[in-house]
Image (spheres, helix red, strand yellow):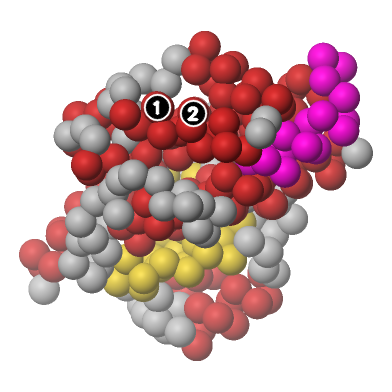
């Protein structure tokens, strides 16, 4: 049951952050500095309780209030909602709320999340086209949140980003061989997947149709063990979407300067 709840939170609830009630765009509420406003733990707790209590209209009201108080939707997208759904999991694990209560709360989150993506995508001016990116989970991974959020940020920054939640090593190698991607990003969730990830990174470089393909790695494992960043063979390995995208842009700029 625990595995089911984990999978529901990350592969059913959070992904719907990427789909669409049009909430007011934060561009009309606060300036770019609003994204630096910290989401407080008390706000995470309050939003989680709102999801538990319902009705769904109160959840929309909470998000709208947060935006009007100066939070960007990007900040809520990256911090408030994922943290609140993780708290729901913790409340169930500690028997503070029943399985039924948590399930109903996740259902409200599903309803809410369906509405957010259009507003999220209107947060910033889309950058000029940067290239084609393929973002995948390491085969066997149960974590999908990071790769989905990363995909959205790549789209905002001008990338034609394709996100594959589930893929096999064989499927990836065939796809890379046939299609010219400029970037492959792999999300890894545990050390058991390390050797698989490193093998894939190496094979992608050897077999890619685009011989200049860049590789990137990230995911929950690096959050828990940031020291592994130094051991990763990917061209880019960062802890945040913003840092990863900046590093990729820098590498592309360096390549362009050499050509």
Mark 2 lies on a secondary structure that is: helix
* 164 w.r.t. 235: above or below: below
Main secondary structure along the magenta-highlighted residues? helix
**Residue 87 placement (x, y as % from top left):** 67, 24
* 139 w.r.t. 103: above or below: below
Residue 138 in magenta stretch: no
The part of the chain drawn in magenta is 94-109
Task: Classify 10 Å Cα crowding around label 1: few (below 14), some (14-19), many (20 and above).
Answer: some
Residue drawn at x 62%, y 38% is: 56
Residue 147 visible in the picture:
no
Q: Give the image quarter of residue 214.
A: bottom left
Question: Disc number at residue 62?
Answer: 2
Residue drawn at x 15%, y 59% is: 254
Mark 1 lies on a secondary structure that is: helix
The quadrant in which the N terminus is found is top right
Of 251 and 93, nearer the camera is 93
Q: Mark 1 points at which residue?
A: 66
Does the CB distance between marks 2 and 1 fall below 8 Å?
yes
Residue drawn at x 41%, y 67% is: 161
The quadrant in which the C terminus is found is bottom left
Of 71 and 131, nearer the camera is 71
Tell me if 92 is positioned left or right of 72 in this view. Answer: right
**Residue 151 placement (x, y as % from top left):** 45, 57
Residue 96 in magenta stretch: yes
Residue drawn at x 50%, y 58% is: 20
Q: Give the image quarter of residue 6.
A: top right
**Residue 141 placement (x, y as % from top left):** 70, 51
Residue 144 visible in the picture:
yes
């Amino acid at each position: 049951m625990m595995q089911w709840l984990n999978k529901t939170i990350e592969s059913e609830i959070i992904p719907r952050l990427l789909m669409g009630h049009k909430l007011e765009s934060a561009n009309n509420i606060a300036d770019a500095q609003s994204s630096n406003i910290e989401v407080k733990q008390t706000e995470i707790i309050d939003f989680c309780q709102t999801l538990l209590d319902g009705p769904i209209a109160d959840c929309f009201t909470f998000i709208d209030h947060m935006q009007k108080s100066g939070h960007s939707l990007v900040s809520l997208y990256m911090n408030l909602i994922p943290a609140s759904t993780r708290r729901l999991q913790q409340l169930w694990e500690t028997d503070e709320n029943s399985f039924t209560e948590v399930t109903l709360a996740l259902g409200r989150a599903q309803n809410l999340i369906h509405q957010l993506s259009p507003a999220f995508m209107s947060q910033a001016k889309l950058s000029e086209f940067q290239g084609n990116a393929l973002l995948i989970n390491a085969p066997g991974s149960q974590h999908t949140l990071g790769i989905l959020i990363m995909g959205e940020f790549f789209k905002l920054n001008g990338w034609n980003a394709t996100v594959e939640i589930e893929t096999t090593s064989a499927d990836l190698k065939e796809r890379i061989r046939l299609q010219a991607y400029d970037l492959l990003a792999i999300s890894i969730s545990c050390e058991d997947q390390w050797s698989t990830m490193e093998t894939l990174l190496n094979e992608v470089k050897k077999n890619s149709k685009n011989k200049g393909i860049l590789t990137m790695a990230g995911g929950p494992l690096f959050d828990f063990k940031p020291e592994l960043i130094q051991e990763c063979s990917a061209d880019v390995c960062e802890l945040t979407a913003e840092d990863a995208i900046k590093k990729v842009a820098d590498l592309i700029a360096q390549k362009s300067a050499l050509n």
